[in-house]
Image (cartoon, rainbow, N blue to C red):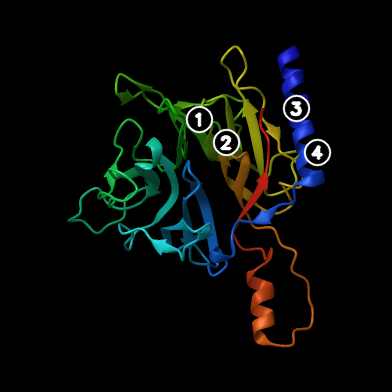
Protein backbone atom coordinates (compact mmCIF):
# COMPACT_ATOMS: atom_id res chain seq x y z
CA UNK A 1 0.00 0.00 0.00
CA UNK A 2 2.86 2.37 0.85
CA UNK A 3 4.41 1.78 -2.58
CA UNK A 4 1.10 2.55 -4.27
CA UNK A 5 0.68 5.86 -2.44
CA UNK A 6 4.30 6.78 -3.15
CA UNK A 7 3.85 6.08 -6.85
CA UNK A 8 0.64 8.10 -7.05
CA UNK A 9 2.25 11.00 -5.18
CA UNK A 10 5.20 11.06 -7.59
CA UNK A 11 2.85 10.90 -10.56
CA UNK A 12 0.83 13.87 -9.30
CA UNK A 13 4.01 15.86 -8.67
CA UNK A 14 5.21 15.08 -12.19
CA UNK A 15 1.91 16.13 -13.70
CA UNK A 16 1.92 19.44 -11.86
CA UNK A 17 5.52 19.98 -12.91
CA UNK A 18 4.60 19.30 -16.54
CA UNK A 19 1.59 21.59 -16.37
CA UNK A 20 3.35 24.49 -14.66
CA UNK A 21 6.72 24.68 -16.40
CA UNK A 22 6.88 22.41 -19.46
CA UNK A 23 4.68 23.59 -22.32
CA UNK A 24 3.63 21.05 -24.90
CA UNK A 25 5.13 21.71 -28.31
CA UNK A 26 4.77 20.34 -31.81
CA UNK A 27 7.62 17.95 -32.58
CA UNK A 28 9.09 19.74 -35.61
CA UNK A 29 7.93 21.99 -38.44
CA UNK A 30 9.23 19.47 -41.00
CA UNK A 31 6.11 17.39 -40.32
CA UNK A 32 3.63 20.25 -40.84
CA UNK A 33 3.48 19.47 -44.56
CA UNK A 34 1.43 16.33 -43.80
CA UNK A 35 -2.31 16.37 -43.14
CA UNK A 36 -2.24 13.40 -40.75
CA UNK A 37 0.93 12.21 -39.02
CA UNK A 38 1.05 9.74 -36.10
CA UNK A 39 2.90 6.77 -34.54
CA UNK A 40 6.29 8.18 -33.55
CA UNK A 41 9.48 6.32 -32.63
CA UNK A 42 12.93 7.83 -32.13
CA UNK A 43 16.31 6.09 -32.01
CA UNK A 44 18.34 5.81 -28.81
CA UNK A 45 20.86 8.42 -29.98
CA UNK A 46 18.04 10.76 -31.04
CA UNK A 47 19.27 11.01 -34.64
CA UNK A 48 16.52 9.05 -36.40
CA UNK A 49 12.76 9.24 -36.13
CA UNK A 50 10.08 7.10 -37.75
CA UNK A 51 6.39 7.98 -38.10
CA UNK A 52 3.23 7.24 -40.07
CA UNK A 53 1.71 9.60 -42.63
CA UNK A 54 -1.89 9.10 -43.71
CA UNK A 55 -4.50 10.47 -46.08
CA UNK A 56 -7.38 12.43 -44.47
CA UNK A 57 -9.60 9.35 -44.14
CA UNK A 58 -6.71 6.91 -43.57
CA UNK A 59 -7.20 5.02 -46.84
CA UNK A 60 -3.46 5.48 -47.42
CA UNK A 61 -0.98 4.81 -44.63
CA UNK A 62 2.80 4.84 -45.10
CA UNK A 63 5.88 4.91 -42.87
CA UNK A 64 8.37 7.76 -43.27
CA UNK A 65 11.59 8.74 -41.53
CA UNK A 66 13.84 11.71 -40.88
CA UNK A 67 17.48 11.95 -39.83
CA UNK A 68 19.24 14.61 -37.82
CA UNK A 69 21.89 16.45 -39.81
CA UNK A 70 23.95 19.15 -38.05
CA UNK A 71 21.34 19.32 -35.30
CA UNK A 72 18.49 19.81 -37.80
CA UNK A 73 16.02 17.26 -39.10
CA UNK A 74 16.26 16.25 -42.74
CA UNK A 75 13.39 16.32 -45.20
CA UNK A 76 11.09 13.32 -44.61
CA UNK A 77 11.45 10.28 -46.84
CA UNK A 78 9.37 7.15 -47.32
CA UNK A 79 10.82 3.81 -46.26
CA UNK A 80 11.56 1.71 -49.37
CA UNK A 81 9.17 -1.17 -48.60
CA UNK A 82 6.04 1.02 -48.71
CA UNK A 83 3.64 0.09 -51.49
CA UNK A 84 -0.12 -0.01 -52.14
CA UNK A 85 -0.81 -1.68 -48.77
CA UNK A 86 -1.09 0.01 -45.38
CA UNK A 87 1.96 0.45 -43.15
CA UNK A 88 1.79 2.09 -39.73
CA UNK A 89 2.95 2.17 -36.11
CA UNK A 90 6.75 1.83 -36.43
CA UNK A 91 8.80 0.86 -33.36
CA UNK A 92 12.60 0.84 -33.48
CA UNK A 93 14.32 -1.88 -31.43
CA UNK A 94 17.53 -3.91 -31.09
CA UNK A 95 19.81 -0.84 -30.97
CA UNK A 96 18.27 0.52 -34.14
CA UNK A 97 18.74 -2.59 -36.28
CA UNK A 98 15.13 -3.78 -36.33
CA UNK A 99 11.96 -1.81 -37.08
CA UNK A 100 8.61 -3.33 -36.15
CA UNK A 101 5.31 -2.17 -37.64
CA UNK A 102 1.76 -3.22 -38.51
CA UNK A 103 0.61 -3.92 -42.06
CA UNK A 104 -2.16 -5.59 -44.06
CA UNK A 105 0.20 -6.68 -46.84
CA UNK A 106 -0.30 -10.29 -48.02
CA UNK A 107 2.00 -13.05 -46.81
CA UNK A 108 2.49 -14.26 -50.36
CA UNK A 109 4.04 -11.74 -52.77
CA UNK A 110 2.20 -13.36 -55.67
CA UNK A 111 -1.15 -12.45 -54.15
CA UNK A 112 -2.70 -9.00 -54.30
CA UNK A 113 -5.51 -9.34 -51.76
CA UNK A 114 -4.99 -7.53 -48.47
CA UNK A 115 -4.54 -9.58 -45.32
CA UNK A 116 -5.79 -8.71 -41.84
CA UNK A 117 -3.31 -6.53 -39.95
CA UNK A 118 -0.24 -8.40 -38.70
CA UNK A 119 2.97 -7.39 -36.98
CA UNK A 120 5.97 -7.30 -39.29
CA UNK A 121 9.57 -6.15 -39.08
CA UNK A 122 12.54 -5.19 -41.25
CA UNK A 123 16.21 -5.57 -40.33
CA UNK A 124 19.53 -3.92 -41.15
CA UNK A 125 23.15 -4.57 -40.15
CA UNK A 126 23.73 -1.00 -39.04
CA UNK A 127 22.37 2.51 -39.57
CA UNK A 128 24.29 2.89 -42.81
CA UNK A 129 22.94 -0.28 -44.40
CA UNK A 130 19.66 -0.87 -46.23
CA UNK A 131 16.56 -2.38 -44.69
CA UNK A 132 15.60 -5.95 -45.54
CA UNK A 133 12.31 -6.93 -47.11
CA UNK A 134 9.43 -7.07 -44.60
CA UNK A 135 9.31 -10.23 -42.45
CA UNK A 136 6.08 -11.43 -40.84
CA UNK A 137 6.66 -12.16 -37.14
CA UNK A 138 4.37 -15.20 -37.51
CA UNK A 139 2.52 -17.29 -34.94
CA UNK A 140 1.72 -17.24 -32.09
CA UNK A 141 1.81 -13.41 -32.18
CA UNK A 142 -0.09 -13.04 -35.44
CA UNK A 143 -3.43 -14.69 -36.09
CA UNK A 144 -6.53 -14.35 -38.26
CA UNK A 145 -7.39 -11.30 -36.12
CA UNK A 146 -5.94 -7.78 -36.35
CA UNK A 147 -2.73 -7.11 -34.43
CA UNK A 148 -1.48 -3.54 -34.09
CA UNK A 149 1.06 -1.22 -32.45
CA UNK A 150 4.06 -3.42 -31.51
CA UNK A 151 6.35 -2.27 -28.70
CA UNK A 152 9.17 -4.19 -26.99
CA UNK A 153 11.02 -4.04 -23.70
CA UNK A 154 14.77 -4.72 -23.58
CA UNK A 155 14.13 -8.40 -22.75
CA UNK A 156 12.19 -8.64 -26.07
CA UNK A 157 8.80 -9.14 -24.44
CA UNK A 158 6.29 -7.88 -27.01
CA UNK A 159 3.21 -5.78 -26.24
CA UNK A 160 0.55 -5.05 -28.84
CA UNK A 161 -3.11 -4.26 -29.48
CA UNK A 162 -5.45 -7.00 -30.66
CA UNK A 163 -9.09 -7.06 -31.63
CA UNK A 164 -10.40 -10.33 -30.26
CA UNK A 165 -13.94 -11.61 -29.55
CA UNK A 166 -12.54 -13.31 -26.42
CA UNK A 167 -11.00 -10.13 -25.02
CA UNK A 168 -12.38 -7.84 -22.32
CA UNK A 169 -13.52 -5.10 -24.69
CA UNK A 170 -13.36 -3.77 -28.23
CA UNK A 171 -9.58 -3.37 -28.38
CA UNK A 172 -7.31 -4.81 -25.70
CA UNK A 173 -3.61 -4.83 -24.89
CA UNK A 174 -1.80 -8.18 -24.94
CA UNK A 175 1.77 -9.33 -24.50
CA UNK A 176 3.88 -12.27 -25.62
CA UNK A 177 6.82 -13.34 -23.48
CA UNK A 178 10.16 -14.03 -25.17
CA UNK A 179 11.55 -17.29 -23.84
CA UNK A 180 13.73 -20.02 -25.33
CA UNK A 181 14.25 -17.84 -28.43
CA UNK A 182 10.57 -17.74 -29.31
CA UNK A 183 7.37 -16.02 -28.27
CA UNK A 184 4.79 -17.58 -25.98
CA UNK A 185 1.07 -17.41 -26.72
CA UNK A 186 -0.51 -13.95 -26.32
CA UNK A 187 -1.85 -13.09 -22.86
CA UNK A 188 -4.29 -10.30 -22.20
CA UNK A 189 -3.29 -7.75 -19.56
CA UNK A 190 -5.60 -7.70 -16.54
CA UNK A 191 -8.40 -5.31 -15.55
CA UNK A 192 -5.91 -2.76 -14.19
CA UNK A 193 -5.10 -2.09 -17.86
CA UNK A 194 -7.98 -3.40 -19.99
CA UNK A 195 -11.74 -2.94 -19.64
CA UNK A 196 -14.94 -3.54 -21.59
CA UNK A 197 -14.11 -0.46 -23.67
CA UNK A 198 -11.14 0.42 -25.85
CA UNK A 199 -7.49 0.17 -24.76
CA UNK A 200 -4.80 0.44 -27.40
CA UNK A 201 -1.45 1.94 -28.48
CA UNK A 202 0.66 0.69 -25.57
CA UNK A 203 4.27 1.77 -25.08
CA UNK A 204 6.30 -0.49 -22.79
CA UNK A 205 9.38 0.79 -20.97
CA UNK A 206 12.82 -0.73 -21.48
CA UNK A 207 12.81 -2.40 -18.05
CA UNK A 208 9.14 -3.34 -18.40
CA UNK A 209 8.33 -1.39 -15.22
CA UNK A 210 5.75 1.01 -16.66
CA UNK A 211 3.35 1.10 -19.57
CA UNK A 212 1.73 4.06 -21.35
CA UNK A 213 -1.39 3.58 -23.43
CA UNK A 214 -4.70 5.05 -24.58
CA UNK A 215 -8.15 4.52 -23.13
CA UNK A 216 -11.06 5.74 -25.20
CA UNK A 217 -14.02 7.57 -23.64
CA UNK A 218 -13.10 6.30 -20.18
CA UNK A 219 -15.22 7.53 -17.28
CA UNK A 220 -13.44 10.34 -15.47
CA UNK A 221 -11.22 11.16 -18.44
CA UNK A 222 -10.84 14.43 -20.32
CA UNK A 223 -12.82 13.13 -23.28
CA UNK A 224 -12.24 11.06 -26.42
CA UNK A 225 -8.89 9.25 -26.13
CA UNK A 226 -6.71 9.90 -23.07
CA UNK A 227 -3.21 8.72 -22.21
CA UNK A 228 -2.82 6.56 -19.10
CA UNK A 229 0.10 5.08 -17.18
CA UNK A 230 0.41 1.93 -15.12
CA UNK A 231 3.48 1.00 -13.09
CA UNK A 232 4.48 -2.51 -12.13
CA UNK A 233 4.36 -3.19 -8.40
CA UNK A 234 6.89 -5.10 -6.31
CA UNK A 235 4.65 -8.16 -6.74
CA UNK A 236 5.21 -8.03 -10.50
CA UNK A 237 1.60 -7.05 -11.22
CA UNK A 238 0.41 -3.98 -13.07
CA UNK A 239 -1.11 -1.34 -10.80
CA UNK A 240 -4.36 0.45 -11.57
CA UNK A 241 -3.81 2.73 -14.55
CA UNK A 242 -3.87 6.49 -13.89
CA UNK A 243 -4.90 9.25 -16.27
CA UNK A 244 -1.96 11.51 -17.18
CA UNK A 245 -4.25 14.52 -16.80
CA UNK A 246 -3.98 17.99 -18.30
CA UNK A 247 -2.23 19.51 -20.15
CA UNK A 248 -1.28 16.24 -21.86
CA UNK A 249 -4.86 15.05 -22.20
CA UNK A 250 -7.59 17.26 -23.63
CA UNK A 251 -11.18 16.87 -24.77
CA UNK A 252 -9.69 15.85 -28.12
CA UNK A 253 -8.01 12.56 -29.05
CA UNK A 254 -4.59 11.76 -27.54
CA UNK A 255 -2.94 8.49 -28.53
CA UNK A 256 0.22 6.72 -29.78
CA UNK A 257 2.59 7.51 -26.88
CA UNK A 258 6.36 7.10 -27.16
CA UNK A 259 8.65 7.82 -24.22
CA UNK A 260 12.31 8.75 -24.62
CA UNK A 261 13.63 7.42 -21.31
CA UNK A 262 17.14 8.80 -21.79
CA UNK A 263 16.01 12.40 -22.27
CA UNK A 264 12.70 12.06 -20.37
CA UNK A 265 10.52 13.35 -23.19
CA UNK A 266 7.01 12.12 -23.87
CA UNK A 267 5.95 12.12 -27.52
CA UNK A 268 2.35 11.51 -28.47
CA UNK A 269 -0.23 12.07 -31.19
CA UNK A 270 -3.10 14.48 -30.63
CA UNK A 271 -6.02 15.94 -32.54
CA UNK A 272 -6.14 18.99 -30.26
CA UNK A 273 -7.47 22.16 -31.82
CA UNK A 274 -7.08 25.84 -30.96
CA UNK A 275 -7.97 27.27 -34.36
CA UNK A 276 -10.30 30.29 -34.16
CA UNK A 277 -11.68 32.63 -36.84
CA UNK A 278 -9.52 35.62 -37.76
CA UNK A 279 -8.74 37.90 -40.68
CA UNK A 280 -5.91 36.92 -43.02
CA UNK A 281 -4.07 39.34 -45.25
CA UNK A 282 -2.62 36.70 -47.59
CA UNK A 283 -3.19 33.10 -48.49
CA UNK A 284 0.25 32.20 -47.12
CA UNK A 285 -0.78 33.67 -43.75
CA UNK A 286 -3.82 31.40 -43.78
CA UNK A 287 -1.76 28.32 -44.67
CA UNK A 288 0.84 29.06 -42.01
CA UNK A 289 -1.84 29.52 -39.36
CA UNK A 290 -3.56 26.25 -40.26
CA UNK A 291 -0.44 24.14 -40.79
CA UNK A 292 1.82 25.25 -37.95
CA UNK A 293 -0.56 25.13 -34.99
CA UNK A 294 -3.03 22.87 -33.24
CA UNK A 295 -5.59 22.44 -36.00
CA UNK A 296 -7.53 19.28 -35.13
CA UNK A 297 -5.53 16.98 -37.41
CA UNK A 298 -3.25 14.23 -36.14
CA UNK A 299 0.10 15.75 -35.19
CA UNK A 300 3.08 14.72 -33.07
CA UNK A 301 3.58 16.65 -29.82
CA UNK A 302 6.27 16.47 -27.15
CA UNK A 303 6.70 17.48 -23.53
CA UNK A 304 9.48 16.97 -20.97
CA UNK A 305 8.05 14.42 -18.56
CA UNK A 306 9.63 12.55 -15.67
CA UNK A 307 8.52 9.02 -14.81
CA UNK A 308 10.09 7.55 -11.68
Picture residue at 36% right of the left edge, 58% below the top: 79
Q: Position of residue 302 (x, y in %)?
A: 64, 50
Secondary structure of the residue carrying numbered label 4: helix
Query: 10 Å neighbourhood of mark 1: few (<14), some, or many (≥20)?
Result: some
Q: Badge 4, how many Cα within 10 Å: few under 14, some, many 20+?
A: some
- Give the residue furthest to the left: 110
Residue at 53% across / 60% down in the picture? 72
Say which element carries label 3: helix
Mark 1 or 2, nearer chain start: 1
Using the numbered discs, state the Cα–Cα distance from disc 1 to disc 2 in whole angstroms.
8 Å
Q: Examine the rendered structure and indicate whether residue 33 appears above or below residue 97.
A: below
Residue bearing the label numbered 4: 16
Which label is found at residue 261? 2
Residue 287 picture location, percent across and down: 64, 78
Quadrant location, the C terminus: top right
Q: CA distance from mark 1 to mark 4?
A: 25 Å
Residue that numbered label 3 is attached to: 10
Q: Where does residue 15 sit, x and y in percent of width and height?
A: 76, 38
Residue for badge 1: 206
Query: Real-space Cα distance between discs 3 and 4?
Result: 10 Å
> Quick one: label 4 or label 2, which is nearer the N terminus?
4
Judging depth in this view, the residue of 52 and 215 nearest the camera is 52
Q: Give the secondary structure at mark 2.
A: loop
Q: Which mark is residue 105?
A: none
Amino acid sequence: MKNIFTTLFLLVINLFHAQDSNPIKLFDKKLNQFLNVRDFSVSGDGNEAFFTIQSPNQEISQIAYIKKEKNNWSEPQLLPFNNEYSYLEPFLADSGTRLYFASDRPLDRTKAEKKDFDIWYVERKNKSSEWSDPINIGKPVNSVLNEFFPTLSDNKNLYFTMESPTGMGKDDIYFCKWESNKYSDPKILDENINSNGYEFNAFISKKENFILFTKYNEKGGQGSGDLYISQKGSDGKWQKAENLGVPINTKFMEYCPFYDEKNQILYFTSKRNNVSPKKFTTLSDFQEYINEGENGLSKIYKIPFTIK
